[in-house]
Amino acid sequence: MAREVQTWRDGEGRTITRSNPFDKPDSVERLDLEGESYSQHLYFYDGLGRTHHDLDEMQNFRYYQYDAFDRMTLSGLPDGTEVERRYAGHSRKELPTWIGVDGKVIGEQDFDGLGRRLWLEVGSARDEYHYEGSQSRPGEHLTPAGESIAFTYAPQLTTEPVSLMAEDEASYTYDALDARLRVAQNSRGRREFDYDAANHPSVERWCDGDTTWTARYSHSRLGRQWLHEDINGLETRSDYDLAGRLEHVKQGQIEVDYSYDSLSRPYLTRCHDLDSGSELVTTLAFDDWGREVSRTLALSGQPTRSITQAYRPDDRLSSRHQQSAGQTLLLETFAYDERGRLTHHVCSGTQLPMDRFGNAITEQSFDFDALDNLREVYTRFADGSEDTCTRSFATNDPCQLVKLVHTHADYPASLDLDYDANGNLLVDEQGRALAYDRQNRLLQVKNPNGQVLVDYHYDAHNQLCGEDRGSAAHVLRFYQDDRLDCTVQGTTRISYLHTQGRPLAQQQVDSPDGTLLLLTGASNSVLGEGQQQTLRETRYSAFGERSDASLQCPLGFNGEVRDQQTGWYLLGKGYRAYNPYLMCFHSRDFLSPFEAGGINGYMYCAGDPVNFRDPTGHFFDFLPSWMTPVMKWGGLALGAIGVAISLGALVTPGIGLMAAFMKASTLTQISTVASVVSAGTGVGSVMAKDEQTSNVLGTVSFVTGLVGVAVGLKALPNALKKKALNTTTVADDLPQATTPNPVVNNLDDAASSLSAPQSSGNVTTSSSPPAAPSPPQAPSVTQNATQLHMQDSQAISASRQSGAPPENTLSKVRNPASGRRNSI
């Protein structure tokens, strides 16, 4: 009997999933509050129950083929492009050995009988991996340049390396009892970690010569971080309400208060500078699907600014309108092709985005090839002038940009780009020379005259930890999770405040006049900064370019750190440089083309920078705040929830079922390739009990659905079945990875990986050092934990009054060494 499942939350639209007699979805339809159909995604199957083709919300058609082991061998994209994969002949596992687009090879690799990668070829670059005996991790990685990176292990303790030997040797010390990382050290310094009884990092020390910088963390019983003392000595205290939602934050002279609507969405944020009395109030409004449609920014002493947004049925942004006092500051419209890539961006208003030469942009058009390469960019400026940029790519590496030709007088008429053997850009568009080490880390930038502009330094985790710029004082960088936490330059110490993934403020220790309140958009891009009674603003092109100067705050496009001298974004805490002018990365992603990096190892966000971001430099995720972890479960505690299953009078009011279906249907609405990984990991991201695993799964669900290389589409229906609503069932749906990817090392240990905490955004591979431990994010709210959340919040509130840690913060948490998970 066919089944119909309806899911909804009070005040929002309804999603209807209709399944066939085999309990696989034939359609996923969304209805607005008036009951009118808003969008529909249709699925069609072959005789073995595998998805044969599908029709998405924009009427885009895709089709798929499989081999005898149900592995996807071909996926046809809406524009007629075909992505083909071949697999190792000696195994039935997902061991892809060849990937091509329209018959053109993109990458090749080979595996031994144990499923270990032996070599990888992308273009003319060949990486080789050598192993000791039957060890699953390589003992040596030979780069395309012929340079060796050697690893040593202590297999009785951990699968992570204990040392990495290259030109900069690194060593890692683990606790002999619980295998937790204690020390990570290289020539730049020594990083030490202490943990509390719940396995949360409690102290992090960076020892640089004779100086030690210390950061401290305190967590509640349920894993909420309620106190953070950064290396500048500035404390950040967080209070939560009885529903476990972040309610109040105080960092130095900055106070932040949150207010929530009936669905637990944070609709109002009040950020207050206690010294100057300035205040920034941000108010949000949402549509029937919880998408942000309006944002009001009210800064003391300045006219109120508003941003309204409209969406397509596939949840992509169609327009964005910034206004102030009834005047249009910037009106943007966006158009996309069948594969969801941005093709047209039109701007009007009094505050237009500008290129680096100060030319105001009114229109840009983008032409892509089958590999997501930008072949041509047309730009019209406000003065009526135009530029057509024709871009060429290497014949031996079809994703490597090698030549640009411009028609506008301000741009170089012709520009040739060159790369080293590892695929790293050697000279940029301004003639600056770039130097790298054998781990592909950017070490130095020189101007065309050979003068050193900047030297970059990295710790043992490959995190950018320091910079030297000419005669200026040495700059130190410190992070919390994936975000910049503090910088130190001589006597200047700056701390940054982020909450719920959004940059809010910047303050300088012992200099209250330097405090900045940050005006941000839905994508977290910093649009302006308020300093006492002064407001400075900026605008970005679709790919993040802006004119120099403007802001003092280093945070820019999508809230990422912008290098103020070069204009690049060193994403992933220094992993790769993204260049908004070139609209691509300087280096190839080592997770491309077979893993989460996608087919094109250089392109930014697969050609859609409006709706996606790439904070790690490895893989991209969805931008709108309504898709953040807060929104996955936000309204489930306080909002009325219903699930109606059309099987007679049967009604099942289950939170997990409702939330999982809501999440899975959202993924299918926005996905450009309806892959099982997209839907399966989407369900897993909601159901994952720890927030870091949830974030990684959510990211992978979007990535694998967009790059056009979806693997194992056959299980998409299973991901939507009632019996599949748990994290372990996702294992068979994930692509095989012989070098560890952000989710699993291989299919055999997928279940254990999904049940263990993952570090969101920190990708560990066989060619990478272990990731630094990260303090956990605030956990999601569920009905089962309501009472614990109330106790937790009360304990934090009481501790804030007394200045002491919450009672029983550590003693009542089960020891992770027992093998049982903590209830967070």
Image (cartoon, rainbow, N blue to C red):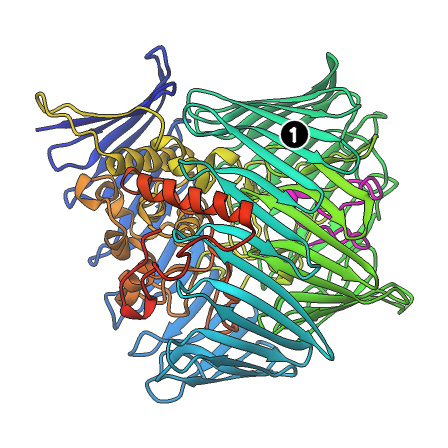
One can see residue 597 in this view? no
* Front residue of this view, candidates 796 and 2: 796
Q: Secondary structure at mark 1?
A: strand
Quadrant (top left, top right, bottom left, bottom right) of the N terminus: top left
For label 1, the crowd category at 10 Å Cα-Cα, with few meaning under 14, some 14 to 19 and many 20 or more, is many
Residue at the image point whose x is 43% and y is 79% from the top? 175
Q: Is residue 377 above or below residue 300?
A: below
Residue 300 is left or right of residue 30, and the answer is: right
Marker count (numbered): 1
Residue at the image point whose x is 34% and y is 61% from the top? 756
Residue at image mark 1: 345
Q: Is residue 90 above or below residue 77?
A: below
Q: Quadrant of residue 594?
A: bottom left
Our reading of the magenta stretch's main secondary structure is loop
Percent position of residue 508, x then y: 78, 50
One can see residue 262 in this view? yes
Q: Quadrant of residue 41?
A: top left
